[in-house]
Image (cartoon, rainbow, N blue to C red):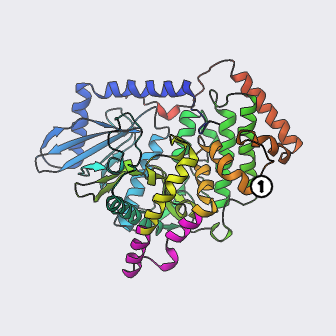
Amino acid sequence: MRTRMRFDDAVWEYSEAMQDAWVHELFKEETLRAIGGLIVKHRGGGVPVELCDANAGASNVCFRMKFKDGGSTLIRFPKPGATMFAEEQVRIEVEVMRYIRQHTTIPVPLVVHWGTSEENPLGLGPFIVMEYVDHEMDLSDALNTPGLAIQDRPILDPDIDEARLELLYAQCADVLLQLSTLRLPRIGSVVLVGDGSKDNWEVAQRPLSYGANELVRLGTLPRSKLPHPDETFTSASTYLNALADLHLAHLIHQRNDAVDSADDCRRRYIARLLFCKLARQGRLTAGGTDLGPFILWCDDLRPANILINEHLQIAGVVDWEFTYAAPVEFSHAPPWWLLVEQPEYWPEGIEAWTEAYERRLQTFLKVLREREDRAIEGGRLQDKDRLSAPMQQSWESGDFWVMYAARKSFAFDAVFWKKIDARFFGPVGLGCSEDDRWKERIQLLSEDERASMEEVVAKKMEEMTTRVLAWDCEEAVVKKG
C-alpha cells in the first residue's frame, strides 16, 4: 500500500511552470529596482544599502533590503501556482501576527505595511512588508542529520546531542503553550473589528488550512467544495465532519493519479466513507470539548519556520498564513514535527516512524512539563491548562492519528488502515492482509453506499484512460497591471 495518494501530476507540472514563469519575470532588473523602491517607500525612512538575493520557499518569495542604520526590512510575495488563496492568506497572516504580538511574547515579525493585488503597483500580487528577523539558521537546519544533500528531505539527526535537543524542544514547547492560551469561541480565522483602536478580535472567516490549499492546488478539488469564506464553525464535531467530507470529495474530484486500479479506488473510498460515518456519529472528538473554547492553531508551524540565532535561541517564528482557531484536539495532539520528517514520508514506513517518534516524544514531554511548571509558577498558565497530559493521552489513545488523518488528505489512506480502522471497527479475520482489510469492511456499507462506490470506481477507471488538466486556478494567476 502506498503511504500517500499521489498528487495530480498534470496540475503539479502546470503549477510548477506557472511559478517558474512568474519568478523569471520577478528577476528582471527593472522589477528588482521597483521591489527595492517599494520596500524603501513603506519602511518610512533610512538609506538603502543592498537588496539581497531572494529567498524562495515553497509558497513565497522574499526580498531583504539592508539599510545604512543597520536595520533590514523584508517584502514577501505569495507565489502564483503555489498559493491558491493569496489575497485571503495575506489578510489572515497579517491579522494573526498582530493578534499573536498583542497576546503573547512569541517573536513574530512586525508588519510594516501590507497590500492587496490592486494595491501593488508592480502587478506582483498581494504583499507584506515586515521587519527582517536576523537569524543564523532555522530549526530544521539545527535538527537535521549532518551530511544530507540539499535536495534531501531533512530528518532528525539520530545521534543528536540530548542536551541540544532538549534546549530546542523546550523553546518550541513554550511557543505551543502560549498559543494554547489563546482561546476563541468559534472555529475560524481571527479578524480585528472596528477601527483597530481597541483590542476587539472576532472569529469571522473560515479556517483556511494548508490542506485546503493543497487540495485545490494538487488534488483538483473545486473551490466550491470548501467552506464559504465567511463560514465559521461552532463545534469541533461539525468541523471534523466538514474535513471528512472533503476527503471523500478529494477522491472523487482529483482528475489524475488518485488511484491505481478499481480495487485501489474501492479501498480508498471505503476508508473515507467510514471516516465520514465516524465524524457524523461524533466519535472523533471528546464531548467535553466539542463546543469549545477553541485554540489558535497553525498548520505550518514546523522547524523550517522557526528561526534561531547562533546561541540556538528562537529569534522568530514565521509563516502564519494557515492559522485559525481549531478544535482543542489539534493542540492536544503532540507535534508531528519532533522527527522533522512527516510519517508518510518516513523512508522505512509509518510503523518505523512511530517507533522513532515514541522515544523523542518522551524527551519533548519532559521539557514541556518543565516549561508548564515555570509558567504556572509565574502565573502565566493554570494547572488545568497543561498540554503534557493531554498530549500523552492523545498519543496513547490514538487520537493523534485521528487528528493527523483529518488534516492530511494525501496521507489519509495509510494512516486510516494502519492506525484508525482496527480501533473503531475491530480486528479482521486471520490471514487478512492490511491491503485487503477493505474487503471485510464492505459489509459496513449499505446497498446504496456500495452502489455509489461503484459509480465512483467506474468514473475513475474511465478517467484513467486519458489525462486531462482540470484545475480551478483562478486566484493562482497574477494579472499584470
- Assign a secondary structure to mark 1: loop
* 65 in relation to 376, above or below: above
Q: Quadrant of residue 308?
A: bottom left
**Of residues 239 and 171, the one drawn nearer to the viewer in this rendering:** 171
Is residue 359 visible in the rendered structure shown here?
Answer: yes
Q: Amino acid at mark 1?
A: Gly
**Of residues 232 and 133, the one drawn nearer to the viewer in this rendering:** 133
The residue range painted magenta reads: 367-394
Q: Which residue is mark 1?
A: 426
Q: Where residue 5 sits: x, y (%)? A: 61, 36
Residue 381 within the segment the image draws in magenta: yes
**Left/right of residue 325 with respect to residue 462 in the rendered view:** left
**Of residues 371 and 103, the one drawn nearer to the viewer in this rendering:** 371
Outermost residue, right side: 447
**Of residues 279 and 123, the one drawn nearer to the viewer in this rendering:** 279
* 293 in relation to 441, above or below: below
Q: Quadrant of the N terminus?
A: top right
Q: Quadrant of the C terminus?
A: top left
Is residue 327 visible in the rendered structure shown here?
Answer: no
Which residue appears at 51% of the width and 43% of the height?
A: 346
Q: Quadrant of residue 173?
A: bottom left
Residue 136 within the segment the image draws in magenta: no
Q: Where residue 101 sits: x, y (%)? A: 35, 63
User: Label 1: how many residues lie within 10 Å, few (<14), some (14-19) or many (20+)?
Assistant: few
Q: Quadrant of residue 367?
A: bottom left
